[in-house]
Image (cartoon, rainbow, N blue to C red):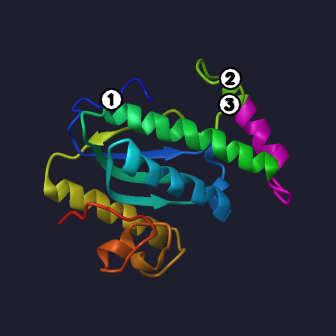
Amino acid sequence: MSRSHKFHNPKGVYFVSFAVTDWIDAFSRREYRDIVLDSLRFCQNKKGMQIYAWCIMTNHVHLVFSSRDNQKPELVLGDLKRFTSRKIVEAIKAHPSESRKEWMLERFSLAAKQSSNVKHQQFWRHDNKPIELWSNAVIDEKIDYIHQNPVEAGFVDEPHHYLYSSAMDYAGEQGLLKNLILAG
């Protein structure tokens, strides 16, 4: 995590973005996106993560979330990132037709060598830049930003058409993650 951005309020609602090292498009494969989804579900059910909005792009993830049950949001997010990092790197190594396997693993190894706290491969960048969302209007603004990301990238024409996002939930359909806290 960046030293200049912190989770100051353990009960706050936060917007975070976290990207793959070197902004590598690791999430062009469904298997890797599904690891993130499964981990988000685990964090909802076992770690006290309350998710208001989410989106998995090709090389980064956006979340609006808070923590319950006295869980520190930075620890919940850190657990999520550590677990997904390990699982995704394992999946890349094991993928029989991953054409970019050697290149990605080399990039992750180089990033780890430059890090003080990662030993082998660094999948995620360290900077999350958590922003505490202090009003319903700001929460709505960040959720709209998250849902517009796939539209701005040219993946879909309408936010709710993008499968790996909470936009479907906000359009009244059941998305891939259950138990969202819908804002607005």
Q: Is residue 180 above or below residue 60?
A: below
Q: In this rendering, would 101 be left or right of 91?
A: right
Q: Position of residue 48 (x, y in %)?
A: 32, 43
Residue at the (68%, 27%) spot, across then down? 112
Residue at the (40%, 78%) spot, across then down? 160
Rounded to the nearest angstrom, the CA distance separating label 2 from label 3 is 10 Å
Q: Position of residue 90 (x, y in %)?
A: 73, 44
Question: Is residue 101 shown in magenta?
Answer: yes
Residue to which mark 2 is pinned: 119
Q: Nearer the viewer, mark 2 or mark 1?
A: 2
Residue to which mark 3 is pinned: 111
Residue 25 shows in this picture: no
Which quarter of the figure is the N terminus placed in? top left
Please state which amino acid type lies under the numbered disc 2: Lys
Rounded to the nearest angstrom, the CA distance separating label 2 from label 1 is 24 Å
* The residue stretch that appears in magenta: 95-109
Residue to which mark 1 is pinned: 6
Q: Quick one: SS at disc 1?
A: loop
User: Residue 130 is drawn in which quadrant?
Assistant: top left
How many discs mark residues in the rendered view? Answer: 3
Marks 2/1 in contact by CB < 8 Å: the verdict is no
